[in-house]
Image (cartoon, coloured by chain):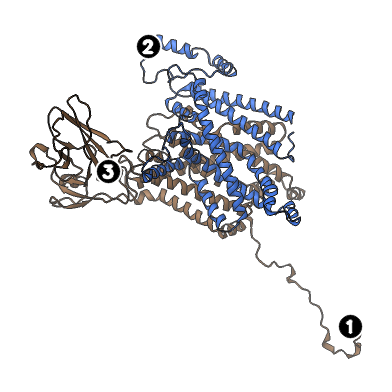
Chain colours: A blue, B brown
């Protein structure tokens, strides 16, 4: 277990290095000049700016400086936002994205497991057919459509109620968090429901379930202890990719609901070509996702004693 | 049997056994793999339905623009943000005249202070309101809202400021649509501070057009004589128009070209790249294999959408380009490792199969083995991958266009149309709903077809229903 963890972490570090290098190469092959964006710059100002951002040095040296700073956890300063460091942006806005993401993943996981178990129990009967239809719909509708429709529904709901039941946009209070996290989690929930259903259908026919029934165990106990617990395992394995999907889906939801999360700043930085912010957030997100996948795999080994992590 | 005495049997008690030659005949004709798969697919109602939908979408995209010959970039300024179910009639009126030359209705003297009133019927040409003077007012502010002002909504768009003139009438010609507006007037006191607004006036604006415009825009045949008060029908937009008055149906057709092109061509290329890469690794094996696959692992570990965005920036879009090619290249560069892994796994597995050994024992050459056994046996899995890759590519394009990193305007794509529609979502939801519907239906169809194909083609991956 310990050796496995160390090996995975080492692999993870190499992957993050690969991500950082790819980001560096991609950003340095961007056509155009980062320093003159609709601004007339004299030669002296230009030179000073180049020195400030280290662009006067040869590219290999820039790469080494960039990697060195990143090891120290320093992502540099923003190109477009005055006097703001990338670290500052990440520290200030990532918690918002993380809160939204955690709520969404909790909603998706709980909903997915419950609906999946329900459809399996009611296999080929009305609840199954209705839920599976909704699931296919959920997989086929893009997250931004969910976000927009969710907002539209909120507006009409508020108009119907005559006063603001739930705020349509913004962030800050608990009531702001409901709809965005549900909207963000819907696609993942549909995906998890489908997975849970097939995993549950497999387990309902397993020998140990039949044994439990033959022993005369109460049906709720069989469901909770034998079926649900075993059926949840495959769901845990896909939580890593699901977290990645929710993270990037968060960009859109943050944009639509005007939530000051890191995703919105990333999209904004991309639109404004804010080089350091793009590089910093990409590497940060990349490292975060790599770490999440490792954690999910480790948790899987803990939850399922049959899995030997070697 | 031994109880029967032998001598009592008639001569014809025994007849010679004839060899049964029909034993070897099969009960049904032998089906090839593909015939079998096709039969299975045809039995799957949902998959067949989605196949029809995909064909219909292709017809819509390829043949649609030949039938519906409206330029997706041309603007119909009479019908901006027009919903498809909205009334398309316009009343013919004389050309616009300034208000001074027009007669003004006098307000009754006994009306309460600050009662707003229409001076003449409200049209898209102009809305003219008058109000009773507020004795202490030094000036007035005029507002317009599309929702009834109240505690939840403010007075709306500030239209004008009348200060010191004592004028109690206002003409609004700002971007009028044939819909309901609420006008409010706020008097200003001697210090210029806002006083309590008067009750809002509800105004239903009718669409009007002048005779000259009706003729120049081709709404009536040339030479037709139009009298004031005649009704003409404006150009037909079956799906309505967008916020710039562009025909939504035409834009959906041209947008489908972009979305479906990327959705089908990108998977096609990255699957081919994946097959080449994966089969090379699988065939060569050993150190080359592990090196190649380690690299593929790294590419898989890249956060997909982040790097799509990054590559999109890196490839750049020149002026006047649509940005489809960078999108395509970025998709191919990032998506091949999945297929490569799959194909490599298949090749490694098939290489060990008994029928390969048998074929080799019968003297088959490597080339024959590849062409006759390896490729046909991986084709099913590859086809399924391809089908599932289409919706995810369409999703990716839509996502990128939605955040403004996809195709560059004015090229329409379903994703960028959704992005445009979002801005007018509250007042004109059809601009968002139609492109969103098209994306969803396309993705749904390809997903269901993929499910069906997987069930039909791949016995091992067959989902348990």
Please tell me if label 1 and label 3 are on a single chain: yes
Up-down: is B25 above or below A33?
Answer: below
**Mark 1 Cα-neighbour bin, 10 Å: few <14, some 14–19, many ≥20:** few
Instruction: Look at the numbered discs 2 and 1 and tell me whether their residues touch, using CB distance below 8 Å.
Output: no
Say which residue appears at 52% left-offset and 27% top-offset: A94
Q: Which mark is residue B76?
A: 3
Residue B332 seen in the current view: no
Residue B177's spot in the image, x, y percent? 25, 43
Q: On what subunit does the disc labeled 2 rest?
A: A
Q: Taking A240 as reference, is B262 left or right? A: left
What is the C-alpha distance between the residues marked 1 and 3? 101 Å
**Mark 3 Cα-neighbour bin, 10 Å: few <14, some 14–19, many ≥20:** some
From the image, tell me which residue sits under label 2.
A42
Up-down: is A260 above or below B365?
Answer: above
From the image, tell me which residue sits under label 1.
B1
Up-down: is B147 above or below A269?
Answer: below
**Mark 2 Cα-neighbour bin, 10 Å: few <14, some 14–19, many ≥20:** few
């Amino acid at each position: 277990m310990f050796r496995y963890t160390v090996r995975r972490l080492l692999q993870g570090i190499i992957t993050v290095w690969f991500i950082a290098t790819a980001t560096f190469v991609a950003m340095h092959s961007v056509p155009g000049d980062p320093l003159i964006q609709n601004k007339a710059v004299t030669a002296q100002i230009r030179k000073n700016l180049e020195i400030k951002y280290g662009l006067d040095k040869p590219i290999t040296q820039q790469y080494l400086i960039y990697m060195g700073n990143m090891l120290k956890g320093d992502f540099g300063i923003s190109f477009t936002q005055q006097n703001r460091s990338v670290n500052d942006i990440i520290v200030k806005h990532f918690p918002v994205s993380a809160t939204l993401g955690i709520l969404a993943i909790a909603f998706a996981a709980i909903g997915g497991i419950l609906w999946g178990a329900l459809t399996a129990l009611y296999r080929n009967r009305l609840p199954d057919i209705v839920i599976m239809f909704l699931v296919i719909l959920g997989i086929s509708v893009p997250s931004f459509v969910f976000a927009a429709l969710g907002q539209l529904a909120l507006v009409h709901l508020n108009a119907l109620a005559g006063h603001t039941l739930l705020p349509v946009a913004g962030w800050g209070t608990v009531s702001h968090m409901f709809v965005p996290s549900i909207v963000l989690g819907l696609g993942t929930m549909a995906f998890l429901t489908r997975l849970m259903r097939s995993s549950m259908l497999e387990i309902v026919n397993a020998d140990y379930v039949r044994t439990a029934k033959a022993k005369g165990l109460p049906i709720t106990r069989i469901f909770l202890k034998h079926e649900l617990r075993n059926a949840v395992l495959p769901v845990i394995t896909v939580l890593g990719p699901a977290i990645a999907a929710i993270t990037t889906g968060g960009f859109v939801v943050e944009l639509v609901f005007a939530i000051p999360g890191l995703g919105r700043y990333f999209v904004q930085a991309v639109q404004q070509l804010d080089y350091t912010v793009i590089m910093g957030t990409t590497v940060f997100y990349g490292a975060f996702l790599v770490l999440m996948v490792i954690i999910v795999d480790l948790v899987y080994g803990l939850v399922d004693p049959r899995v030997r992590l070697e | 049997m031994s109880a029967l005495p032998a001598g009592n049997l008639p001569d014809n008690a025994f007849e010679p056994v004839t060899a049964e030659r029909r034993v070897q005949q099969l009960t049904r004709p032998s089906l090839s793999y593909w015939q079998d798969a096709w039969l299975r697919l045809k039995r799957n109602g949902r998959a067949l339905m989605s196949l029809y939908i995909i064909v219909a979408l292709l017809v819509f995209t390829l043949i649609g623009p030949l039938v519906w010959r409206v330029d997706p970039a041309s603007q119909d300024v009479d019908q901006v943000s027009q919903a498809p179910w909205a009334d398309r009639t316009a009343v013919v009126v004389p050309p616009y005249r300034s208000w001074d030359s027009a007669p003004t209705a006098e307000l009754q003297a006994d009306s309460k202070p600050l009662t707003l009133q229409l001076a003449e019927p409200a049209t898209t040409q102009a809305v003219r309101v008058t109000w009773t003077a507020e004795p202490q007012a030094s000036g007035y502010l005029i507002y317009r809202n599309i929702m009834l002002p109240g505690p939840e909504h403010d007075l709306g768009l500030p239209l004008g400021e009348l200060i010191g003139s004592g004028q109690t009438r206002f003409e609004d010609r700002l971007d009028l649509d044939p819909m309901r507006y609420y006008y409010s007037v706020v008097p200003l006191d001697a210090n210029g501070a806002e006083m309590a607004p008067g009750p809002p006036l509800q105004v239903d604006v009718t669409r009007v057009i002048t005779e000259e415009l009706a003729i120049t825009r081709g709404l009536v045949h040339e030479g037709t004589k139009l009298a004031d008060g005649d009704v003409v029908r404006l150009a037909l937009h079956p799906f309505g128009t967008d916020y710039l008055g562009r025909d939504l149906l035409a834009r959906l057709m041209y947008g489908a070209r972009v979305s479906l092109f990327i959705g089908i061509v990108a998977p096609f290329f990255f699957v081919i790249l994946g097959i080449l890469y994966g089969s090379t690794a699988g065939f060569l094996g050993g150190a080359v294999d592990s090196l190649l696959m380690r690299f593929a692992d790294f590419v898989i570990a890249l956060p997909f959408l982040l790097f799509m965005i990054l590559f999109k920036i890196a490839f750049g879009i020149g002026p006047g380009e649509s940005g489809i090619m960078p999108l395509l290249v970025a998709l191919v560069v990032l998506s091949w490792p999945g297929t490569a892994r799959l194909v490599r796994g298949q090749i490694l597995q098939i290489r060990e199969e008994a029928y390969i050994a048998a074929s080799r024992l019968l003297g088959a050459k490597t080339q024959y083995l590849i062409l006759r056994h390896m490729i046909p046996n991986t084709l099913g899995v590859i086809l399924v991958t391809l089908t599932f890759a289409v919706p995810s590519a369409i999703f990716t394009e839509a996502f990128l266009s939605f955040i403004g990193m996809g195709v560059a305007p004015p090229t329409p794509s379903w994703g960028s149309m959704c992005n445009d529609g979002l801005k007018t979502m509250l007042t004109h939801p059809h601009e968002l709903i139609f492109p969103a519907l098209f994306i969803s239906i396309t993705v749904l169809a390809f997903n269901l077809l993929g499910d069906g194909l997987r069930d039909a083609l791949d016995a091992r991956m067959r989902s348990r229903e």
